[in-house]
Amino acid sequence: MNNLKSCIDACLMCVATCEKCASDCIKDGNTACALLCRDCADICALTARFDARDSEFSRELHRLCAIICKACAEECDKHTDHRYSCKACADACKNCAAICEELS
């Protein structure tokens, strides 16, 4: 359960940072980053919920969550020089992806 707790915590952190980043990117007109952040926030929230109930399908979600988190981190890394929320999002996504990969 400790690994699942770590994953839930990482996913929830990722949800919060992705939502902030998406809002900032919308204001900046960066729709590509905003859309990816929204997808990432949604998959992370779903993964946390599945982990909380110890779903038999969590392993598959971990795999997909890691893929989307990596894509989001890659996109956000492009904007870290002018947007702090992109830096925070990229860092949270990298952490979440690493934990999810371990559980997939």
Image (cartoon, rainbow, N blue to C red):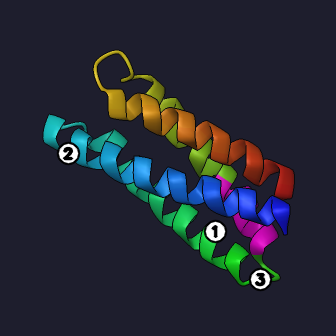
> How would you rate the neighbour count of disc 2 (Cα within 10 Å): few for under 14, some for 14-19, many for 20 or more?
some
Mark sitting earlier along the chain (1/3): 1
Residue wearing tag 2 = 26
Residue 55: percent from left, percent from top? 77, 83
Identify residue type, mark 2: Ile
Q: Going by the image, does 1 lie left or right of 6?
A: right
Residue wearing tag 1 = 47
Magenta stretch: residue 59 in it? Answer: yes
Q: Quadrant of the N terminus?
A: bottom right
Marks 1 and 3, Cα distance to the nearest angstrom?
A: 10 Å
- Whether residues under marks 1 and 3 lie with C-beta atoms below 8 angstroms apart, the answer is no
In this rendering, which labeled residue sits more in front, label 2 or label 1? 1
In the rendered image, the vertical position of residue 41 relative to residue 75, given as above or below: below
Q: Quadrant of residue 2?
A: bottom right
> How would you rate the neighbour count of disc 3 (Cα within 10 Å): few for under 14, some for 14-19, many for 20 or more?
few
Residue wearing tag 3 = 55
Magenta stretch: residue 82 in it? Answer: no
Q: Secondary structure at mark 2?
A: helix
Q: Of residues 20 and 61, which is closer to you in this image?
A: 20
Q: Secondary structure at mark 1?
A: helix
Q: Residue at x 36, y 23 (%)?
A: 79
Residue 28: percent from left, percent from top? 16, 35
Q: Quadrant of residue 31?
A: top left
> How would you rate the neighbour count of disc 1 (Cα within 10 Å): few for under 14, some for 14-19, many for 20 or more?
many
